[in-house]
Each structure stands twice: as structure tokens, then as C-alpha cells.
Image (spheres, rainbow, N blue to C red):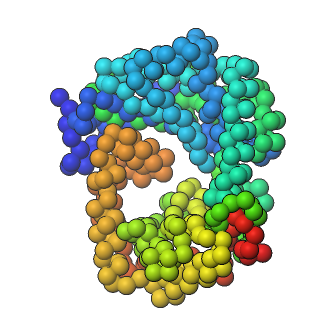
């Protein structure tokens, strides 16, 4: 009989003899199960000369194995209503899907085959290469993407891996060979780089046995792990990317901040929530969108990782309002950095964040993502139960110190993509 998680998560964690890590959380939401196989094979591990290799490998990994061609893989999943999703970020490449509990054994067998034995067929490589190049060219025609990628390059300059466009460039994708894909897979898709998370209507003991059986003959060894390079000091700069045929200008404005493991994480999280997340977009949206009516959208995001992550402000505006919008962003950022948040903002934001924790864990997929993060950052299997108290322990002075440390307009970088008329 399945159980719910209203009293907190109770995952079972096991390290397999070959080095793979398994986490299983039994739930009672539905007779379904979410599977996530995360490998430390993100863009940090691709050669500096081949940006986009990790993302491209994720597009081709499910297009044929030593025992199944692309059609057999698709049919084995589609027939059970299963959609395999492959995602790649700075550090991880993750294969994930949700299936009925009764189909778990079969789906796990297919996923394990895809993870361990991809053959990267040449015809499928060329098909995915063409699709990827098309996607990159579509990104190049999207002001929001252009601004965001340009800002990352400004914040993480000199070729830092955090500054790379996820998909790479047309030139780099054109240079990727089958040998490059095979080498990347051999180096980073191994038992010791794998964390398998299973959440749903399953037995933890049997699930660990099944995963052990699926991967027990796999003994590949990874290349040496790579530390995140030091981030070069930011050189504040504002640039414009002219896209004369576009009706809207998109602004990306931001800073580098802290790592996820910094003791000040919760204070920075609360600070960013006040700035651009609370309600319909925090102070930014209240000012720029609601009061001044000059932005189609305005918000901020905070994405710390093993290295210092970015705090990014995004806004979409009429081209005639670019300068005013940047001035308004400077004003909100500078005001929060100098004066801090109010007691009311502090109380409401803390209550909101504590209350949001159950919503993060309201379905199997959400729990799987949460557990992958907990394992990756080494936060502890009881982190969901400790997090409310960690938030409650934050003081308003700590939030204001976080704002003062990060939110200094003179240290910001900004990129504007759209019709001519923005900053130079």
C-alpha cells in the first residue's frame, strides 16, 4: 500500500557496488512512477572548443542502442504512453519520464539501455544536427534569447563554461563528430556519475533491486571530475544587439552572486523574491509594469549552482521605453540594495516561501526534481523538513546584507536586444 508525504519525505538512499546512487521515495498520489537518471555530464564537461556538445549528445542519445534502433526505443515507450525527456544544464544531463507503476520494469530497461549503450547512428546524428542548427538560428532571431545569452557572456567572460550558450553555436555544432559524442558518453555517462531517483507507487526495496539489476554489469569509469573555474571579475557593461525588424526590445540585466552552498543562500533567496518574484513580479513588476505601464513583463531570477550563479532581471518593453526601463531597474535595484526591505515585505516573503515548500512536493515529478537537487548539492535527505526552519531563522538584517552585497547598479551588466535605440 502506498503512503503520502504530508509528514515529510522519507527517501531511501542506496549506493550500488558499481558506484551508482539510488534514491527511492514511495508516494500515494497515483498508480504511477517518475524515473530520473541524472549524470554529471553537463556543459561543464564539454571541451572548450565544442560548446553545445553536451546538449547535442542529449538530442542523440536516445536514437539507437546496441540492441534497439530509434523506432524500437520510441515504440517501447510510446506504446505505454511514456514521453522520454532529456535535459542538459551546466552540470547534469538527465533522462526522465513518468509511467504507470505496472510498466516500471519495462521502462527502466529501456532507459538503462539508452543510458549505457547509445551507438549514435550517423544518420540520426545528421538529422539531429539539422534540427539543432535550426533551433540555434531560431534563438538568434529571438530578442529574449539573444539578450539572455549576451548577458551570460558578459557575466561569465573569457570562455567560462557558465557563459556558454547551451546549444552551442552553428559553427560548433557543425564541427561535432560521432567520435566526439562517443568520447563524451564514455567519459561522463558512468555508474559513479549517476544518480537514479524513483518516486511513486513502488516498493523501495524492490526498486533498488531492479535498478541494481539494470545497471549491475556496467563498470565504466569516468574521466576526472572538473571543478568550476574561478569566475573572472565582472566588468560592468551595457550593450545593444540590433534587431531592427522586431516590435519589442528585451532587456537582460544582472549580476553574479553566490553558490548554492553559501550559508547566505536563504537570505539571497528571500531578497530576490522581494525584488522580482513575489506576487506578480515583486518590486520590479509593481513599478515598471503596473505603475509605469512600460513593460510587457518584468521579473528576476536567482540561479546559484556549484559556482557563483547569476541573479538576472528580465523585462520586455516597447523600444521607445528602453532607457526609461533601464533607469527604473537601476532605481529599484539601487533602492533595495541601499535601503533593504521593509518589515512587512520580510514577513510576507518568509511566509510565502515556507508555504511554497509543500507545493514543490505536490506530485511525483516535483519530488524527483527536489531529490535530485538535494543529492547533487549534498543537502541531506531531511532537507524538506529542515528548510522551513532555515527560512524562519533568517533575519531581516541578513536579507538586507545580501541585497547590499549584490544589488549595486554600478556593478551590473545589461544586454538589450531589439530595434536600434538602446544603450551603447
Locate the C terminus by quadrant: bottom right
Nearest the viewer among 183 and 301 is: 301
| Residue 155 in the image, given as x and y percentages of width and height | 68, 65
Q: Residue at x 28, y 62 (%)?
A: 355
* For residue 313, above or below residue 343: above
Nearest the viewer among 237 and 17 is: 237
* For residue 185, above or below residue 250: above
| Residue 234 in the image, given as x and y percentages of width and height | 71, 71
| Residue 8 in the image, given as x and y percentages of width and height | 25, 49
Q: Residue at x 45, y 84 (%)?
A: 340
Is residue 239 found left or right of 61 in the rendered image? Answer: right
Q: How many marks?
A: 0
Is residue 16 found left or right of 135 in the rendered image? Answer: left
Q: Residue at x 54, y 35 (%)?
A: 86
Q: Quadrant of residue 230?
A: bottom right
Is residue 119 found left or right of 401 in the rendered image? Answer: right
**Outermost residue toward the left?**
1
**Residue 45 visible in the snapshot:** no
Nearest the viewer among 417 and 364 is: 417
Q: Quadrant of residue 16?
A: top left
**Residue 423 visible in the snapshot:** yes
Q: Residue at x 31, y 48 (%)?
A: 361
Amino acid at each position: 500500500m502506498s503512503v503520502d508525504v504530508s509528514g515529510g519525505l522519507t527517501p531511501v538512499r542506496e549506493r550500488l557496488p558499481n558506484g551508482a546512487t539510488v534514491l527511492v521515495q514511495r508516494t500515494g498520489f497515483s498508480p504511477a512512477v517518475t524515473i530520473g537518471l541524472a549524470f554529471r555530464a553537463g556543459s561543464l564537461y564539454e571541451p572548450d572548443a565544442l560548446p553545445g556538445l553536451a546538449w547535442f549528445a542529449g538530442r542523440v542519445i536516445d536514437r539507437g542502442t546496441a540492441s534497439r534502433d530509434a523506432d524500437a526505443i520510441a515504440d517501447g515507450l510510446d506504446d505505454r504512453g511514456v514521453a522520454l525527456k532529456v535535459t542538459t544544464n551546466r552540470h547534469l544531463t538527465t533522462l526522465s519520464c513518468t509511467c504507470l507503476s505496472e510498466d516500471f520494469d519495462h521502462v527502466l530497461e529501456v532507459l538503462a539501455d539508452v543510458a549505457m549503450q547509445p551507438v549514435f547512428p550517423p544518420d540520426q546524428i545528421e538529422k539531429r544536427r539539422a534540427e539543432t542548427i535550426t533551433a540555434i538560428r531560431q534563438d538568434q532571431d529571438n530578442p529574449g534569447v539573444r539578450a539572455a545569452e549576451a548577458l551570460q557572456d558578459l557575466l561569465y567572460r573569457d570562455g567560462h563554461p557558465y557563459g556558454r550558450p547551451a546549444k552551442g553555436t552553428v559553427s560548433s555544432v557543425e564541427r561535432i563528430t560521432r567520435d566526439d559524442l562517443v568520447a563524451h558518453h564514455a567519459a561522463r555517462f558512468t555508474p559513479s556519475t549517476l544518480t537514479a531517483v524513483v518516486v511513486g507507487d513502488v516498493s523501495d526495496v524492490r526498486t533498488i533491486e531492479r535498478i541494481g539489476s539494470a545497471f549491475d554489469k556496467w563498470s565504466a569509469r569516468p574521466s576526472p571530475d572538473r571543478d568550476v573555474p574561478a569566475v573572472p571579475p565582472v566588468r560592468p557593461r551595457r550593450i545593444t544587439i540590433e534587431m531592427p525588424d522586431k516590435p519589442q526590445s528585451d532587456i537582460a540585466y544582472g549580476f553574479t552572486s553566490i553558490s548554492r552552498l553559501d550559508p547566505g543562500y536563504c537570505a539571497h533567496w528571500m531578497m530576490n523574491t522581494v525584488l522580482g518574484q513575489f506576487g506578480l513580479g515583486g518590486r520590479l513588476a509593481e513599478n515598471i509594469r503596473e505603475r509605469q505601464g512600460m513593460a510587457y513583463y518584468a521579473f528576476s531570477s536567482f540561479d546559484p549552482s556549484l559556482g557563483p550563479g547569476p541573479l538576472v532581471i528580465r523585462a520586455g518593453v516597447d523600444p521607445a521605453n528602453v532607457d526609461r526601463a533601464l533607469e527604473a531597474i537601476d532605481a529599484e535595484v539601487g533602492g533595495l540594495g541601499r535601503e533593504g526591505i521593509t518589515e512587512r515585505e520580510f514577513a510576507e516573503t518568509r511566509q510565502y516561501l515556507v508555504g511554497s515548500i509543500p507545493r514543490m512536493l505536490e506530485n511525483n515529478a516535483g519530488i524527483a526534481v527536489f531529490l535530485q537537487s538535494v543529492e547533487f548539492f549534498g543537502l541531506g535527505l531531511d532537507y524538506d523538513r529542515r528548510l522551513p526552519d532555515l527560512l524562519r531563522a533568517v533575519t531581516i538584517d541578513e536579507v538586507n546584507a545580501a541585497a547590499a552585497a549584490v544589488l549595486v547598479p554600478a556593478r551590473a551588466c545589461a544586454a538589450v536586444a531589439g530595434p536600434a535605440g538602446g544603450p551603447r
